[in-house]
Image (tube, helix red, strand yellow):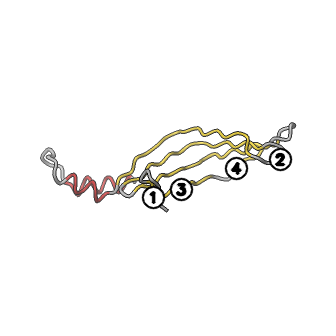
Amino acid sequence: MNFDSGVTDELLYIDFPSEKKLPSGYVVLWFGKAVQQSVYKEFRIVHEGLLRVVFNPELKVCGLLVILIMHLYIADATLLYFSANYKDFPSGIVIDDILGVLCATS
């Protein structure tokens, strides 16, 4: 599936929810961790946070709350390598060292 925006895939990872039933019949699900990724050909954007979903007594979604804690932009290491080869670095910095650090942190 291709999207017009260049997104090749959308991924959603959620933790096990904690459920609370309200006296009004509404059900609230809290997800302690929710991770959403937008995958593009050359990079991905990752959003991490909390998710709350509220259902009415007929179990239809009537409310959605996303609390964003952090987001990351992750580029393909090979693209960084090729673009880094054309830049001037201070003496003593080796491209392979930079890639090793990038790969270790991702």
Amino acid at the residue labelled 4: Pro
Q: Which of the pair 64/15 is nearer the observer?
A: 64
**Distance of label 3 from label 1 (alpha carbons):** 10 Å
- Tell me which label, 4 or 3, sits earlier in the chain: 3
* CB within 8 Å, label 2 to label 4: no
The CA span between labels 3 and 2 is 28 Å
Does residue 87 appear left or right of residue 47 in this picture?
left
Mark in the foreground, 2 or 4: 2
Residue 23, image x and y in percent?
Answer: 87, 37
Q: Which residue is mark 4?
A: 17
For label 2, the residue is 58
Q: Residue at x 46, y 59 (%)?
A: 2
Q: Nearer the viewer, residue 61 or 27?
A: 61
Q: Which residue is mark 3?
A: 11
Identify the mark at residue 48; answer none if there is no mark: none
Residue highlighted by disc 1: 8
